[in-house]
Image (cartoon, coloured by chain):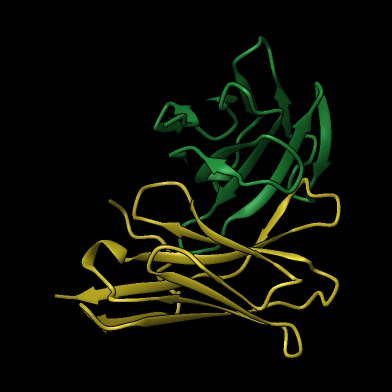
Chain colours: A green, B yellow
Amino acid sequence: EPEVTQTPSHQVTQMGQEVILRCVPISNHLYFYWYRQILGQKVEFLVSFYNNEISEKSEIFDDQFSVERPDGSNFTLKIRSTKLEDSAMYFCASTQGRGTEAFFGQGTRLTVV
Amino acid sequence: GESVGLHLPTLSVQEGDNSIINCAYSNSASDYFIWYKQESGKGPQFIIDIRSNMDKRQGQRVTVLLNKTVKHLSLQIAATQPGDSAVYFCAEPNNAGNMLTFGGGTRLMVKP
């Protein structure tokens, strides 16, 4: 069964450093998403991406964040100048179309120290 | 794995019993709803969905009920098994269909 894959599974970084979280969406999917889940809280939407541009973003997705599809398979989330409160699980997801079933990756646990 | 949802409402059931997990939504214009299951250390996994032109939809051992009058959604799991232990979230897409808003989640614990 096709799946969304994310790397690394766990990333530890020092406050102020930049991190790049990587995702390989399902190959025939056209919409890509990043969500985050702070420990003990619900899953929160960050950004959606379609046709090489941001389709929707939340208030959380400020200038500290950026997304990119550098090639035909990868989808990345860059967090500049990380803060302690950026520590969370970050999930990538993809869908074939708008409003269709979203497939989530296993997540990257980001720990900012 | 690390526990998610330390402050989540918890439903504890005996193996073999039926489980009912509830969700309230606020947007009366919402026309599509989804239930996700999240096991410890994993990403959300699609279980079942329902459109607003239906009030009930059945899957394998799961049933989703939608009551639009009171804006309430429920997930029923028949003959609950230990493998059903997880956190369950309801979610709804926005009108553009390009983002999901998740509910707070319910932790289901199945006692053998």
User: Horizontal placement of B4 versus A102: left or right?
Assistant: left
Residue sitting at x 77%, y 45%: B98
The residue at 66%/9% (across/down) is: A71
Query: In the rendering, at what x and y percent does residue A105 appear?
Result: 48, 37
Q: Quick one: which residue is furthest to the bottom in this view?
A: B70
Residue furthest out toward the top: A71
Q: Nearer the viewer, residue A66 or B34?
A: B34
Q: How many marks?
A: 0
Q: Residue at x 31, y 65 (%)?
A: B84
Q: Is residue B74 above or below residue A71?
A: below
**Quarter of the image with the C terminus of chain B in it:** bottom left
**Residue B68, percent across and down?**
74, 83
Q: Residue B86's image quarter?
A: bottom left
Task: Report whether B88 appears left or right of B82.
Answer: right
Q: Vertical placement of B64 versus A11: above or below?
A: below
Look at the picture and state if B9 lies above or below A8.
below
Rendering coords of residue B28 (x, y %):
83, 77
Instruction: Name the residue: 40% across, 63% down.
Output: B60
Q: Position of residue B93 (x, y in %)?
A: 74, 57
B17 lies above or below A88: below
- A3, A54: nearer the viewer: A3
